[in-house]
Amino acid sequence: MTTMGRRDFLRDYMMIPPGTLMAGVVNMIVEIPKGRRSKFEIDKNTGLIKLDRYLYSSSVYPGDYGFIPQTLAEDGDPSDILVMVNEPTFSGCLIEARVVGLFRMKDKGVNDYKVLAVPNSDPLFGQIRKLEDVPQHFLREVEHFFATYKQLEGATVEPLGWSCAEEGTAEVRSAVERFRASLGTILG
């Protein structure tokens, strides 16, 4: 792939809007499908989906996991998002998702929040509009996964609990603003 081809491929991901944020609707790019131990990421040099590592534990991702384009979280990466799905999609899939909550945690002392969402067009999740609509057992699964998935790597994650859909959407808006502000430092 030529240098120009790499830039075009990366630009394609960067050109996807973060979503309308009306009614908490965002776009997400799947990196890790539900049920996987493989940790995939978009490679910043090539734009390809790269196997970063395998989780050291036997835990698997409880939903499709990825990022919201054109966002910048406090940890310096795009905002993380976990989407409840009935069946896994695939790495690189674009999902229009409705924010239903926010799992707050710290990783190495830095805020590393996870937006929780459902596919906006899936009738199976049509009644899930807020955190209280999500089955409590699923919330416990997500919290357990993120609290323990790095333990065998020797890393400590500090769970801080759940916040409502409105706070999740507000966090995404803040991440969009951080992303736009970062463009000024890159381009300026």
Image: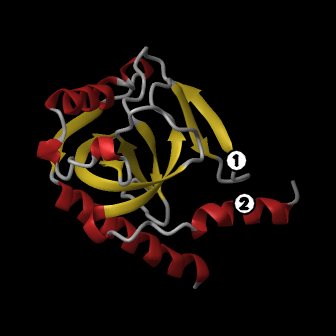
> Taking 104 as reference, is 57 above or below it?
above
- Label 2 and label 1: CA atoms lie apart by 8 Å
Instruction: Tell me the element at label 2.
Output: helix
> Taking 120 as reference, is 103 above or below it?
above
* Mark 1 crowdedness (10 Å alpha carbons): few <14, some 14-19, many ≥20: some
* Mark 2 crowdedness (10 Å alpha carbons): few <14, some 14-19, many ≥20: some
Front-most of residues 53 and 63: 63
Label disc, if present, on residue 48 of the rendered structure: 1
Q: In the picture, residue 59 is in which quadrant?
A: top left
* Position of residue 159 measured from the top left corner of the image (x, y, whole percent): 22, 36
Front-most of residues 86 and 108: 86
Q: Answer yes or no: is residue 159 visible.
A: yes
Verify CB contact (< 8 Å) between mark 2 and mark 1: yes
N-terminal of the pair, mark 2 or mark 1, is 2
Report the residue at 58% width, 28% height from top: 53
Type of amino acid at the residue the image marks with label 2:
Phe
Label disc, if present, on residue 9 of the rendered structure: 2
